[in-house]
Image (cartoon, helix red, strand yellow):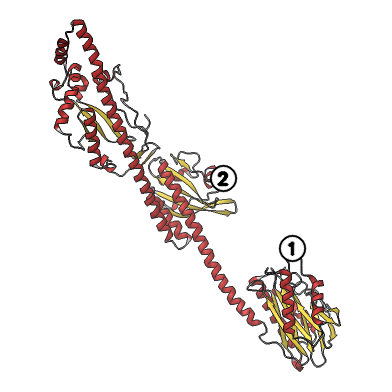
Amino acid sequence: MSPDAAPTEPVPAAARQLLGLGGAGGQVSPGPKPIATRSPRRSGEGSDSVDLPPRQLSLTDFLDLETLQAVQDGFVSITRLQAQILDAAGRPVTRPTDAKVRSAADAATGLLLEEDGGGELAAGGRFVAPIAVGPERLGSIVIDAPRHASDAGIGHDELERLAASLGLGPEERQTLFEAAEPAFAANRGASVQFLFLIANAITRLCYQAWEGQTHVQELEALYRVSTALAAASDVQVVLDTAAKSIAEVLDADGVVIRLLQEGPDGPELVRRANHGLSASYINSGQLLVNKSELYSKVIRGEIIYIEDLPGDARTYYPELAREEGLASMLALGLADHDQPIGSIQVYTVETRRFSRDLVRLARAVSQLVSAAISKTRLEQDRNRNSAMVRQMQLAAGVQRRMLPQRLPELAGFDVAARYIPSFQLSGDFYDFVRLGDGNVGFAIGDVAGKGIAASLLMASVRASLRAYAHDLYHLDEVIRRVNLALCRDTLDGEFATLWYGVLDPTARRLTYCNAGHEPPILVRDGHIIPLDAGGMIVGVDRDQDYDKGVVDLQPRDLLLLYTDGLPDAMNAEQKRFGRVAMEAMLREIANREGPPRPAAEGLREIETHLRNHAGARRGSDDTTLVLLRCT
């Protein structure tokens, strides 16, 4: 018989005759078959079972006494048969129905028992309809035997008197008796059928109540687990808390949680938490996913059950499982947005089959654990990112302080500068170096890369330039020394572009050296003069030599130093601003009639042109501008 089906009660011979079933021996089900139920589990029972508390379940765990009494009294009043509801041990749960009802019920059954001659029904004294949730017997409804056959309201004598009053002969009387017998049997059969219908109805109510209690217990378990996980502050605490909570909720003897990592031999499930298992077992060795069909399935989302862990070919370390005393295992995966992140193994020391309800609960718990791991990782990442942002903000503050705080004031010249980083930290820089004899050095550079690394490299280039600019007279030698220092202190791929010029404001002479930087644009009388004398970028070739250039500035000359963020600015159609547009823009600014406008106003006009081209889009490259106007 299926463990999901309520057991049927053997029907005595007398009952079989009364119900018209015939035959001898065997089991029949007098009435509708009780509904299939998932049974509460006790150790060693079938796979469709769930855990029970140690005590015996009773009817009153599911239905209150008043309801049971009302069911019994209603049955008696309808069938006129005395019935009572008993618990699993045969003790009455309800009180007997009113004595008048009992007397009438006994009379209705007396003739049948008398003519049955006692038999099995009389000896047993009852019809029994079981009430069960699966194999767990909760109780029964019984029809008790009447006390005296003479208590029957209609019997042989009554039929004789009826036949005499009708003037029936012997043959007619025999026909009456033969016709009456099936009617009494049919009445009895209908009553017993109704008895089993009532038992089935109570079974359904008990099952619904039991299922509701099971769901409540599952929700309580999930609440306990989620509450514990919510209090965890980092991933390791989450995993340790989860292992303990899973063992408690699933009544397991051991739990191991592993996280998926990429190892030298491929994906590996690395133990991160353990509850209830020895160190020798959990530290047994690698668990490589690509060498285990079982765990390959687990991380793909399958739930794997192994009843005999030491004897199953899928077990990774069967001898260690035997030494540990483990019998059964349930394994299920952990996933974050359908991406596998680990596994949970639940172990028992006794052979155990996990019910559908427990598997469902285990899956729900695994989802909670996965979510908690993901949430905690995100929080840790967010905290690390916040710390990084704070550090970058501090570094950006330092970088901004390294930029000139004051613009040089030079007779016959007006200077303005603008620094626009695409990130908080930039690889761009500009600088003004005050030299002897009233000369001023102008520098602009762009270090490869973005962020902290570029910022540090920029600081190194700036420091080297300042150091050599004060000690050396010739610009080409200054740049050569900066190049040597950068080649010595940096890795391959770390380099910078650099333009450095020294202005003698008295002679209005500008001497410069360009190390691979965007050539500054000098506009004179509508003509463009690029300042490109020099050499290659610094930080690549330690043997590189550099040239220098000289230009004498004239009134109304306009000189723009810039980094590649200006020509490389993109619009919505991914079109660069470009050097041609830059030159046209500078011609327009330089050739405007009237007295020369301040350099700061010229920079604002350049920024307006840039915004008109790129819109509100923030470029991916830093932009640095220095504008020198000759008055």
Eyeballing the image, is 151 above or below 198?
above
In the rendered image, which quarter contains the N terminus?
top left
Name the residue rendered at 47%, 43% in the picture: 318
Residue that lies at the very extreme toward the front in this rendered image = 166
Residue 282: % across, % down:
46, 51
Question: Disc 2 marks which residue?
Answer: 291
User: Who comes first in sequence, dot 2 or dot 1?
Assistant: 2
Horizontal side, residue 20 vs residue 443: left or right: left
Horizontal side, residue 262 vs residue 93: left or right: right
Eyeballing the image, is 164 above or below 217?
above
User: Disc 2 marks which amino acid?
Assistant: Lys
Question: Disc 1 marks which residue?
Answer: 573
Eyeballing the image, is 555 above or below 34?
below
Residue 87: % across, % down:
23, 36
Residue 117: % across, % down:
18, 17
Residue 351 placement: quadrant: top left
Residue toward you, 599 or 318: 599
Horizontal side, residue 534 vs residue 395: left or right: right
Other-residue count near label 2 (Cα within 10 Å), few / some / many at <14 / 14–19 / ≥20: some
Horizontal side, residue 422 vs residue 484: left or right: left
Residue toward you, 611 or 466: 611
User: Disc 1 marks which amino acid?
Assistant: Glu
Residue toward you, 518 or 183: 183
Secondary structure at badge 1 equals: loop
Name the residue rendered at 67%, 82% in the picture: 403
Q: Is residue 276 visible?
A: no
In the rendered image, which quarter contains the C terminus?
bottom right
Secondary structure at badge 2 equals: helix
